[in-house]
């Protein structure tokens, strides 16, 4: 399971579920650690506690990237910012929060409710808005982050992390089948793909196991990790359904699951 590259990219599933309560799955959050840096993709309810449970400190976060603004992907932003301003336990290093156009307006609406309790020193908090209509590249100390629009909401983004050593991690966020998600996952070493409902319950705006398998097959990714699983997915064999389309390694995500590249 380990790549021969000198650098190590570690990924931890903080939340593999959705907004529907499930004792085995928190809402979506994916932590990525590389080169002494820590980033988080999505921040659903309980993410702060999930980070602590796997030994990660929210104060070490360098970036938080949102795939879109639905509550199950964003609801721990307020607890994160509230904790970050604690005089005793707060953050001392800058945090960049990224997401689609409208991110700052989203924050300002939260600020209208919580006011100073989610304010940070401007030197500690920066917002980076990404236009979903254009493929965007963000340079990072250890590589680059590519974003592409996904087929879910007008703000939905998928993320592709390419390290300087050639490792590729892709995360779809929520999406139905589209060419962009195939491009996103192209030849990825590890592709975290949403798999919301079994095939017989397939819903617009989301992927089923067969749909996720189709994306993985067309993308030629090396390993497929199914995530964003509604409770119905735990009642059926999603791997068998996915296997009809994709012959590579398939892993069903679980909270606290770690990966290394």
Image (cartoon, grey):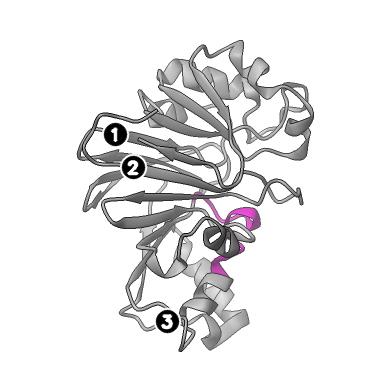
214, 188: nearer the viewer: 188
Asked which quadrant contains residue 243, the reply is top right
Q: Does the stretch in magenta take in 7?
A: no
Residue for badge 1: 167
x then y, percent, for residue 208: 65, 26
The reply to whether the C-beta atoms of the residues labelled 1 and 2 are less than 8 Å apart is yes
The magenta segment: 67-78
Q: Secondary structure at mark 2?
A: strand
The reply to whether the C-beta atoms of the residues labelled 2 and 3 are less than 8 Å apart is no
| Crowding near the residue tagged with mark 2, few <14, some 14–19, many ≥20 C-alpha atoms within 10 Å | some
137, 45: nearer the viewer: 45
Looking at the rendered image, the disc whose residue lies closer to the viewer, 1 or 3, is 1
Asked which quadrant contains residue 136, the reply is top left
Looking at the rendered image, the disc whose residue lies closer to the viewer, 2 or 3, is 2
x then y, percent, for residue 248: 48, 16
Q: Secondary structure at mark 3?
A: loop
Residue 120: image tag: 3
> Which badge, 2 or 3, is on the more N-terminal residue?
2
Residue for badge 2: 9
Regarding residue 105, the answer to whether it shows in the image is: yes
């Amino acid at each position: 399971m380990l790549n021969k590259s000198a650098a190590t990219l570690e990924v931890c599933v903080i939340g593999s579920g959705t907004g529907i309560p499930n004792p085995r799955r928190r809402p979506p959050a994916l932590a990525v650690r590389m080169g002494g840096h820590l980033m988080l993709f999505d921040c659903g309810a309980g993410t702060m506690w999930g980070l602590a449970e796997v030994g990660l400190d929210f104060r070490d976060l360098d970036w938080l990237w949102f795939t879109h603004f639905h509550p199950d992907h964003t609801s721990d932003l307020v607890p994160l910012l509230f904790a970050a301003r604690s005089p005793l336990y707060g953050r001392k290093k800058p945090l960049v929060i990224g997401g689609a156009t409208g991110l700052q307006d989203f924050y300002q609406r939260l600020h209208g409710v919580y006011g100073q309790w989610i304010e940070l020193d401007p030197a500690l908090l920066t917002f980076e808005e990404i236009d979903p209509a254009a493929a965007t590249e963000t340079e990072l100390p250890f590589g680059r982050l590519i974003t592409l629009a996904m087929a879910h909401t007008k703000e939905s983004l998928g993320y592709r992390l390419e390290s300087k050593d050639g490792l590729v991690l892709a995360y779809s966020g929520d999406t139905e089948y589209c060419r962009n998600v195939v491009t996103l996952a192209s030849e990825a070493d590890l592709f975290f793909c949403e798999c919301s409902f079994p095939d017989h319950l397939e819903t617009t705006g989301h992927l089923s196991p067969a749909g996720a398998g189709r994306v993985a097959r067309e993308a030629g990714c090396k390993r497929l990790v199914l995530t964003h699983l509604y409770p119905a997915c735990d009642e059926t064999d999603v791997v068998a359904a996915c296997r009809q389309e994709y012959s590579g390694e398939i892993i069903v995500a679980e909270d606290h699951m770690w990966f290394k590249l």
